[in-house]
Image (cartoon, rainbow, N blue to C red):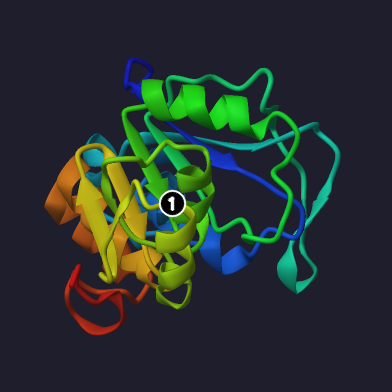
Amino acid sequence: MANKKVFHVGIAVYEHLELSDVAPVDMLNSIGYDFIKPLTSGGYAPIEALAEAPRIKIDWIHTNLNVVEATAGLFLKPTATYATAPRDLDLLLVPGLSIVGNHPEGSAEFLKEASEKSAIVMTTCGGGLWLASLGILDGKNATTNSGALTTARQLSPGVVWKDNNWVVDGKFWTSGAAGFGFGMMAAFCREKFPVGHVDRALAGLGFGRLGVGAFGTVE
């Protein structure tokens, strides 16, 4: 296991971060080796799952390392800064910064560089608006919260905005309202990692297979 490649995730953090926008990352964490290993010890997951479980590293990135207040009374401790975080992530997750909110200091440069160099760029809810405001989504198919699509088309006409639950355009995965981020993340995990392992791990969370129940579909 020592030589297993780490799948590195970076999450763009802002003040009053909405938990529902970033919650899908826990689905990814839940298929990871560090989460699965204790389950095998207790008999809740087969030992063979360890061979298929990826090593997951998640960085919470903000302007500085000071504690950030999120919604629902949670206080989040960032693990990296926009100035120092790696740009070549396996997955960059951009949650829904309010369209009336201020971009965190240092975030614009980071998001432009990381969006270019990272393998996958994923947004939830208003995160599509955040990237679009920086010109990152120009010429691409994308979506955002359906309630903001009219505004999105006015503010960023260079983006091909779609009224879908989520949209995939190359390495860019964008979801509509926060809840659709779960379906999008499940679809990504099933595409990137062994399907049987992903389905088993997500079923353990009560989610079941993609396309059934709360996950929804891309349309």
The C terminus, quarter of image:
bottom left
Question: Where does residue 75 sit, x and y in percent of width and height?
Answer: 80, 56
* 139 displayed left or right of 27: left
Q: Quadrant of residue 167?
A: bottom left
* 144 displayed left or right of 126: left
Q: Quadrant of residue 214?
A: bottom left
Question: Where does residue 179 sit, x and y in percent of width and height?
Answer: 42, 73
Amino acid carrying label 1: it is Ser
* 88 displayed left or right of 168: right
Question: Where does residue 180 sit, x and y in percent of width and height?
Answer: 36, 70
Is 59 placed above or below 125 here?
above
Task: State the residue position of label 1.
Answer: 156
Residue at x 45%, y 37% (from the top left corner): 135
Is residue 80 visible in the rendered image? The answer is: yes
Q: Rate crowding at label 1 as few (under 14), some (14 to 19) or many (20 or more) other CA atoms within 10 Å.
A: some
Count of picture labels: 1
Residue at x 32%, y 22% (from the top left corner): 4
* 125 displayed left or right of 108: left
Residue at x 22%, y 39% (from the top left corner): 52
